[in-house]
Image (cartoon, rainbow, N blue to C red):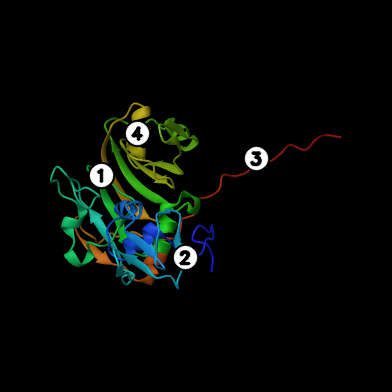
Amino acid sequence: MPSRSSTSREGIRLNRFLASCGLGSRRSCEHLITAGQIQINGEICKNMGTRVLPDDSVRHNGIMLQQARETTLLLNKPKGFLCSRGDPQGRDTIYNLLPPSFHHLPHIGRLDLDSHGLILLSNASKLSECLSHPKHKIEKEYHVTLNQNFNHDHIERLTRGIRLEDGLAVAQSVKPLSVRRVSVILTQGYKRQIRNMFDKLGYRVKNLERIRIGNLMAHDLLPGKWKLLGDVEIQAAMMQNNLPKKPKRKRARKKI
């Protein structure tokens, strides 16, 4: 039997497995792990890196856990709603927009309080891994309205990268839509990335809307509304709209 400390990439990370069983967000599930409330095959497990294998028996305080049926929904988040299960200040969260039967679904990524647009909620581990890890380079497209006219010279700055506290923030594509509106495509997910990038260039973002995740869009989904996704739509979320590659410069032939 393989050691629980095995670095095998098989199975599902423990916190993700617990979240898919309806025990809360992945972060809150980590607290259950460190508190010694989780047992795997009869032994208490406090190792965050543990991966749950298909034949494992997982219990929370002695109660056998079973993954809920995989469910994925797309929500058009309005402004003024937090991407959180609860708020100490009593502000509205995205879960106030959903029936109680979907409150166990973790949100994948987030939009800040003043931003709006598409966000996915799902207990499907493959989808969560694909959208959460930057190595998969899944594109998210945003429409951004600025407080002043956009300087086209700043396109190069944004696509070359701007140093933020979290690291080098790079836009995959920036395209002007009007004098003060631009389309921005990201494959990263730093906190308030777009707002902070434009702030470094002297702008203030007045409106920020996410209009696309992978190849998934929802033109008919009104703010505050949601819909369950089928397999085709879930696959669309995990696909990237490949941007045209920059043409290579032709090397001048040496004269002999």
Q: Is residue 215 visible?
A: no
| Disc 3 to disc 2, C-alpha distance | 45 Å
From mark 2 to mark 4, how far is it between C-alphas?
A: 37 Å
- 213 in relation to 196, above or below: below
Dots 3 and 2: beta carbons under 8 Å?
no
Q: Which residue is mark 3?
A: 249
- Cα–Cα span, label 1 and label 4: 13 Å
Q: CA distance from mark 1 to mark 2?
A: 35 Å
Q: Amino acid at mark 4?
A: Asn
Is residue 193 in view from this perspective?
Answer: yes
**Residue sitting farthest toward the left:** 90
Q: Quadrant of residue 40?
A: bottom left
Say which element carries label 3.
loop
At a point 24% along the width and 60% down the height, the residue shown is: 221
Residue 218 in percent (x, y) is at: 29, 60
Q: Which kind of residue does numbered mark 2 sit on? A: Gly
On residue 11, which mark appears? 2
Q: Which mark is residue 115?
A: 1
> Along the polypeptide, which appears first: circle 1 or circle 3?
1
Q: Earlier in the sequence, mark 1 or mark 2?
A: 2
Task: Tell me the kind of residue under disc 3.
Answer: Arg
Graded by Cα atoms within 10 Å as few (under 14), some (14 to 19) or many (20 or more), the crowding at tag 2 reads some
Kind of element beneath mark 2? loop
How far is the residue under mark 1 from the one under mark 3? 39 Å
Instruction: State the quadrant of the C terminus.
Output: top right
Q: Earlier in the sequence, mark 1 or mark 4?
A: 1
Label annotation for residue 196:
4
Q: CA distance from mark 4 to mark 3?
A: 33 Å
Instruction: Residue 15: name its quadrant.
Output: bottom left
